Amino acid sequence: MVLQTHGIKEWGYCNHNGPSTWGENFPLANGPRQSPIDIQTDNSTLDQSLTPLRYEYSKKSKTLVNTGAGWKVTVVGAGSVLEGGPLNYKYKLEQFHCHWGNDNSCGSEHTVDGKSFPAEIHLVHWNCDKYSSFDEAVDKEDGLAVLGIFFQVGNENGTMSCVTDLLHRVPHKDDIIPMEFEIDPAKFIPENPSYWTYPGSLTTPPCLESVSWIVFREPVDISEKQLEVFRSMYNYGRLDRTPEDEFRGKILSNYRPPLELGARKVRYCQLG
């Protein structure tokens, strides 16, 4: 997941600044509660105490921005709530964004029994029962809850079209526009509500270990054309020189590979 932090050291997904280097400037990237992980189905535990998630979202969004690491939609959080499942508090939606790969063999941050998906969307929420803002919650152990949803290549995703139809207007890093279309984030969620859950972290620097991860087991469709629109974005500003990296300034891959689960447990809720 993408977090924009003022004054943060430069990082990215190329050889010189990619995930293998993040621990040099961001010590938490080497911590015991890092994300993503490879979800190994044989080692996940059915937890009968887990309940279905309850969620309600406003259809109003604020902005669409090219962060230099991908795209991000900030939302109007008023009226949104996520609760239930493994969560002990109510959480409010802050933003959603996506990770993808340079071809369809990779792109998701979480994997399942070693299998990657072409993309993964993250719906990022903060604990509004205990904290007064996203910024206050972001570094707390129970501060964030993120829904992870896998994309598979198939039919065009009508909800995602509200994003992909506008991405040509934010091709470069720091480009930002008002979000013109109403968009219901709940429509990204698959029909089968079964999920895995585990304690983890932000998947981008500073890799804060503050996330309750909820990853849906069923993927949803996205078209090849929509994925190509993602890959057409640039990781540098309009006035910057084209980087001399292996991607030539394109955001072709923006995912962090899986980290060790360590002593953590993955639980799952079987529904539907």
Image: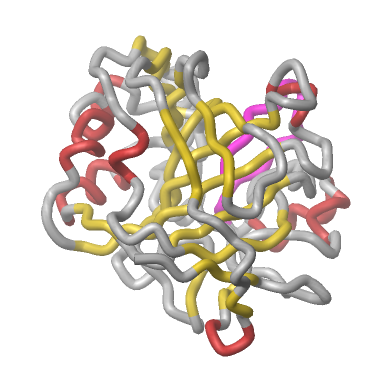
Find residue 113 and report its horizontal and vertical position in percent: 50, 83
Residue 82: image quadrant is top right
Q: Is residue 106 above or below residue 229?
A: below
> Seen in the image, is 123 located left or right of residue 33?
left
Q: Characterize the magenta stretch by its predominant secondary structure.
A: loop
Q: Which residue appears at 63% of the width and 86% of the height? A: 43
Q: Quadrant of the N terminus?
A: top right
Task: Inspect the magenta stretch and tell me whether residue 7 lies in it.
Answer: yes
Tell which residue pokes out farthest to the left in this image: 155
Q: Is residue 83 above or below residue 165?
A: below
**Magenta-colored span:** 1-14
Q: Which residue appears at 19% of the width and 46% of the height? A: 157
> Seen in the image, is 4 located left or right of residue 201?
left
Q: Is residue 11 above or below residue 125?
A: below
> Seen in the image, is 198 located left or right of residue 154?
right
Which of 16/272 is in front?
Answer: 272
Which of 68/5 is in front?
Answer: 5
Q: How was this image coloured?
A: secondary structure
Q: In this orientation, does residue 248 appear? A: no
Task: Inspect the magenta stretch and tell me whether residue 47 lies in it.
Answer: no
Q: Quadrant of the C terminus?
A: bottom left
Find residue 131 and report its horizontal and vertical position in percent: 78, 23
Which of 25/43 is in front?
Answer: 43
> Seen in the image, is 162 located left or right of residue 208?
left
